[in-house]
Each structure stands twice: as C-alpha cells, then as structure tokens.
Image: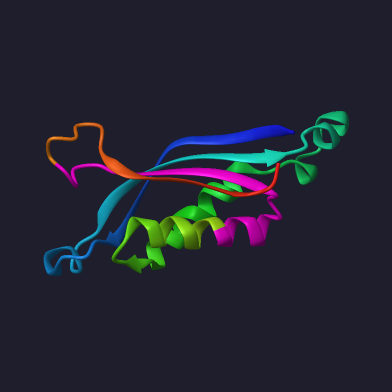
Amino acid sequence: MDRVFIEGLEVDTVIGAYDWERGIRQCLRLDLRFAWDNRPAAAGDDLSLALDYASVSARIQAFAEQAQFELVETFAERLAKVLMDEFNIPWLSLKLTKPGAVPAATGGVGVEIERGCL
C-alpha cells in the first residue's frame, strides 16, 4: 500500500486541562501518514482519484478551529475518526506534538496513534 504524508502541519486550538489553558489557543504540530492506493490517480493523472492532501489539511485546520479538548489523546482520536470517515482512509498514523507543554522537552510532548488496517 502506498502512503501519502503531511508533516509539520501546525494548527491552533483550545487544548489543555488547566484553567489557564481553557481561555487561550495553543499550537499543535501534526505529522500524518495515510494508506492510499496511488496507482489509479497516477495512471490518469487524475486528482479526483488521489488523496488530496490540501483538502485533508484544510479539514484538519477546520477541526482544530472548533475543537476544545482537555487531552491531546482526545484530539488525536477524534481527528483520526473524522479523517478516516470523511476521506475514506483505510489506515492512518498520526503524531501530535504539543510544543512547550513541558519546558525541558525541547522537541515537545504528545501522542502517536495508528488506526485502521493496511
């Protein structure tokens, strides 16, 4: 199975369990990989048969705009479900990083999940 990827997508959202976090927007960084059969799109040079990463990225941005979760785990699970359902994605890997959540972790902290079947 082929893979389509989006790396380093930054979104602003309401995320966090502490009271001070509930009134601000914070940046999350997303790295995603999607299983997708690229052969039909490539055979006819047809975007309608490809997984359109611009459309997926726009949907992620819209999701983040509306989201208000305490946990990055919840954000990741709900986003994975939305993407798989709306874009008919059979498998995805999602890495969500919350920069600055632990000051000593200069690369950030977060979660990685895989959902679906290859």
81 to the left or right of 39: left
What residue do we see at 25% from left, 32% from top? 107
114 shown above or below 68: above
Q: Is residue 87 magenta?
A: yes
Q: Quadrant of the C terminus?
A: top right
Which quarter of the picture shows residue 73? bottom left
118 to the left or right of 113: right
Q: Quadrant of the N terminus?
A: top right
What residue do we see at 63% from left, 56% from top? 84
The number of numbered badges drawn on the structure is 0
What residue do we see at 63% from left, 35% from top? 4
**Percent x, y of residue 32:** 51, 40
What residue do we see at 27% from left, 42% from top? 109
The magenta span reads: 81-102
9 shown above or below 78: above
**Percent x, y of residue 99:** 24, 42
86 to the left or right of 76: right
**Percent x, y of residue 85:** 65, 62
89 to the left or right of 83: right
Q: Is residue 92 magenta?
A: yes
